[in-house]
Amino acid sequence: MPAGVCGCCGPLRPRYKRLVDNIFPEDPKDGLSKSDMEKLTFYAVSAPEKLDRIGAYLAEKLSRDVVRHRYGDKSRPSSSLEMKDMKIQSQMCSSSSLTADPRLLFVKFANIEEDTPSYHRRYDFFVSQFSAMCHSTHEDPETRTRIRVAGIKGLQGVVRKTVNDELQAIIWEPQHMDKLIPSMLFNMQDSEDMDRAGHPITPSGGGQDGEENPAALAESCFRELLGRAAYGNMNNAVRPVLVHLDHHHLWDPNEFAVSCFRIIMYSIQAQHSHHVIQQVLNHLDTHNRNTPRVRAGIVQVLLETVAIAAKGSVGPTVLEVFNTLLKHLRMSVDFELGESSRRNSSTSVSSGRGKESDERIVQNAIIQTIGFFGGNLPDYQRAEVMMFIMGKVPVYGTPCHTLDTVKIGHQGTKRIQTMLLSSLIMVTSGFKSKSMAAALPPPFLDPLFSISLMEDSELRQLVLEILHNIIDRHDNRAKLRGIRIIPNVAALKIKREKISKQDVAFMKKHGQQLYRHIYLGCKEEDNVHKNFELLFTTLAILTIELANEEVVIDLIRLAIALQDMALANEENMPMFIRCGINALVAAYLNFLSQMIANPPFCQHVSKVIELRTLDAPYLLPEHIFRDKCPFPESLDKDDKQLFFQTADMAECLAGPGYNSERLSIPYIPQVTVLYTVGKIIHRCKQTSRDEDRLTRRKSFVDTISLQVDIMSNSLPDKSQLAEEITFETLKKAIDTTGLEEQEREKRRQVMEKFQKAPFEEIAAHCESKATMLHDRLAQIFELTIRPPPSPSGVVSISAGHPQHQSVPVYEMKFPDLCVY
């Protein structure tokens, strides 16, 4: 090197330094030299190994100018890739000035599209710095706003520069999302004017006001980030939102939380909705011991996300979602009952009531969420959910694997039954099935009808409403609302279709089961006006949706049986119930006669109604269900003009299409052994006041059913009990050679009878057998039931006998005794 020449200046300086120096004019007002910038660009492209040195030297020059506050136009990015890299490196070296003055940003740089990917660029520093700016607490409000806006714009630039670059997928990792997301939420939360409906305050890329408003700008950036989230990034994007809401105690009240998740659900792609729902469910699990209002806030957020989720896009884990919700429903009931028991033993009544009401908020939110979730599902998935929920309802006589009724007692069981049935009403609302057999399979229908026989009017009402949702496929319920004498059914414009072959088969298989539960539900002593309204609607919907000529005859037989039951009053029903049954029969036969359009039948029904209007208004629905309606002292069944006569109706239906001869066969409900024993045991329960034992009892019906098919011919009568053991009887018992022949002949006769006998004869035979069985059970169970002295004792069920004080019929051991 020649003497006097320095390597740091002059012509011997490195070429890249001279090229960088040349782009800056002596007078900053003249702007950057375009021709010299092109030379620098060409040099950088030709010698890419010099890029690091170019960037370092440019950063050195810019840092020196920034410290001297000589900004000029040096923050303006160039149009070349190398110049942009040098600008980034220069800003990384001047971090102190970056937060001091928000004008030094690279938003314009972020908007420039690149033709070649970058393998070395990282934005960790910018995410940290811009996030810190978003949380600025500067004393001057104007300066604080400017810094926050600058930080948000910087984060927006990072997002735009990285989310579409596969080489920058690292931006979605938790260490970056934990800074990006809270920074945006912090500014959104800080605005009092935020739109709580989850819609942007200003359109994306709005005017100056929106750009200078931190809340609006943060929301726009938040939406943009979520809209770019891919399938594998959803969890990392949603988790920081939940953590932020926890740290800032934003679940109670939860307006901001609801708004955030509305924004999330409207911003993400529809097929990713189930990710968000699953994240909220998992968060609910982590807060299962938190206060009721926090849990209620999370459930209400879940409700919002489910309501927004597109139909059919809630993912494959539907049953898991319902299982989680039902688990939290059970836990809420446990908490409520625990608080209730502690409240009863303490003096703090007001705080206990507050806790109880808070748990009710949680329970109602869960029920609404289950209903909305089920309502968003397609019909085939909704049928599975209906079966799933029905399997969770604790029903006496059926196993309940998930809800242990022993621990929660009678009150808790009733609460869970009510809430689950309420959620079933919401799930079945709008459900349309082409076949009743698919909508009401036996695993669903049997437990549902078991609940309909419970001595609780509210539960029976819920069961009937569920049946209405499923059976009413043409939305006729609103036209039938309220039990009344409809003067002109044609004016209702009822929609109906011809009954299909599948529904005909369904009624042949399950029709008697439907009739039986309507019959037994009518005579419950705690029935109120609403129960009779729902029973009337049930009969009317059955007529519209599932009635052919054979079903019409069965429904008339059912109506006459209800009338006879109310008149005979063998069970000493209250006068209100007896008059209500007669009013129900009148309202239904009036509807049925007009639906089948049989003039003689209509005339007979109208005549009875007219006479009742004059002489016995208490037998009509418009009067008996009115407040302070006077009840008669008795009902005179001999006054035949006030009641519907079977012979007259059979004569009216004697024409073609109807088998009127079947009307002469009285309808007798095929009461099951389980129902009979359950009713007897339930009456025994009414005499017991031991609340502690009631709460510990397990399903008595589970044990008393015993898998025993009690046939009428197997029940002992007096002659069998008193029969003496002689040589002849012993000989007959030992000699079994002729018994096999007799059994084979007996089976052959039975098979031949069921193959060749008419249906009416078989039905009458079955009904008579059921009646005989019912009478024998009633005779046997005129019994003395001695409750066990302890939960592990022995229950003896004995029947009276003329020669003995007590003849034991069964002795059964019950670890826990629960009454039907």
Image (tube, rainbow, N blue to C red):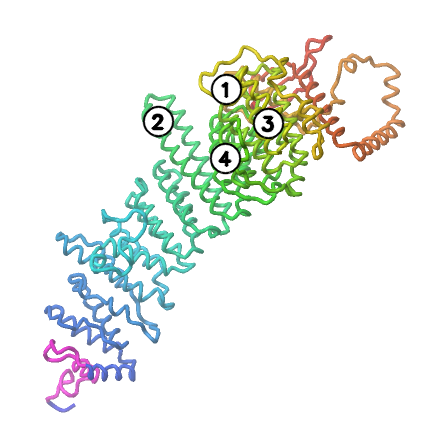
Residue 776 visible in the displayed image? yes
Q: Quadrant of the N terminus?
A: bottom left
Question: In the displayed structure, would residue 267 be above or below residue 162?
Answer: above
Mark 4 lies on residue: 479
Q: Secondary structure at mark 2?
A: helix
Q: Identity of the amino acid at label 3?
A: Leu
Q: CA distance from mark 3 to mark 2?
A: 48 Å
Marks 1 and 4 close (CB-CB < 8 Å): no
Q: Identify the image quadrant of residue 750.
A: top right
Mark 1 lies on residue: 624
- Assess whether residue 31 is covered by the magenta stretch: yes
Magenta stretch in the rendered image: 4-33
Eye-nearest disc, 3 or 2: 3
Q: Quadrant of the C terminus?
A: top right
Q: Earlier in the sequence, mark 1 or mark 3?
A: 3
Q: Identity of the amino acid at label 1?
A: Ile
Q: Secondary structure at mark 3?
A: helix
Q: Give the x, y percent position of residue 585.
A: 58, 24
Mark 3 lies on residue: 589
Q: Residues within 10 Å of mark 2 (few under 14, many from 20)?
A: some
Q: CA distance from mark 3 to mark 4?
A: 17 Å
Q: CA distance from mark 1 to mark 2?
A: 38 Å
